[in-house]
Amino acid sequence: MGTKEERLIWRMRFLGLKEEDLAEKFILGSGKGGQNLHKTSSCVYLKHLPTGLEVKCQKTRSREENRYLARWMLCQLLEAKRKNEQRKATGLLEKERRKKYKRLFSEQQKVLVKKRERSEKKAWRQKVRFEE
């Protein structure tokens, strides 16, 4: 399949992610890592302008490695967002399908019998009232 950079380029192309749509900043790192981390701006901040998705990556001390990882994380976020939208759309379609479904007369009668049984069971749970 090629190197990891080639796989990332293919994945970005598949998702429709273009380099022109990305705003990239390099930020001074923080946390563990020593003097080199605090001297260099190796932390990468990426923002996908069309969707507004943001990623910040500081996993390694290498700026190039962080750039790669940030783009990979952005691809994952974009895929998750699209899958969530697809789930919502299919859920709405399924809801409409269920609304249109008409039960058979015998099925409806079974449901009504179960409802009646349940209401009788609930009636036994009520407090006892004394009439004067």
Image (cartoon, rainbow, N blue to C red):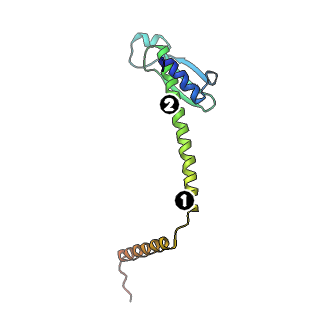
Residue topped by disc 2 = 76
The picture quadrant where one finds residue 30 is: top left
Residue at left offset 42%, top offset 17%? 60
Secondary element under disc 2, as helix, strand or loop, is helix
Q: Is residue 125 positioned above or below 23 on the image?
A: below
Percent across and percent down for residue 6 are 52, 19
Is residue 18 in sight in this rendering? yes
Residue at left offset 52%, top offset 23%? 71
- Compare marks 1 and 2 and give the one earlier in the sequence: 2
Percent across and percent down for residue 63 are 49, 14
Percent across and percent down for residue 36 are 43, 10
Residue topped by disc 1 = 98
121 left or right, relative to 4: left
**Camera-side residue of 50 and 82:** 82
The picture quadrant where one finds residue 120 is: bottom left
**Camera-side residue of 39 and 89:** 89
Q: Is residue 83 positioned above or below 44 on the image?
A: below
Is residue 66 in sight in this rendering? no
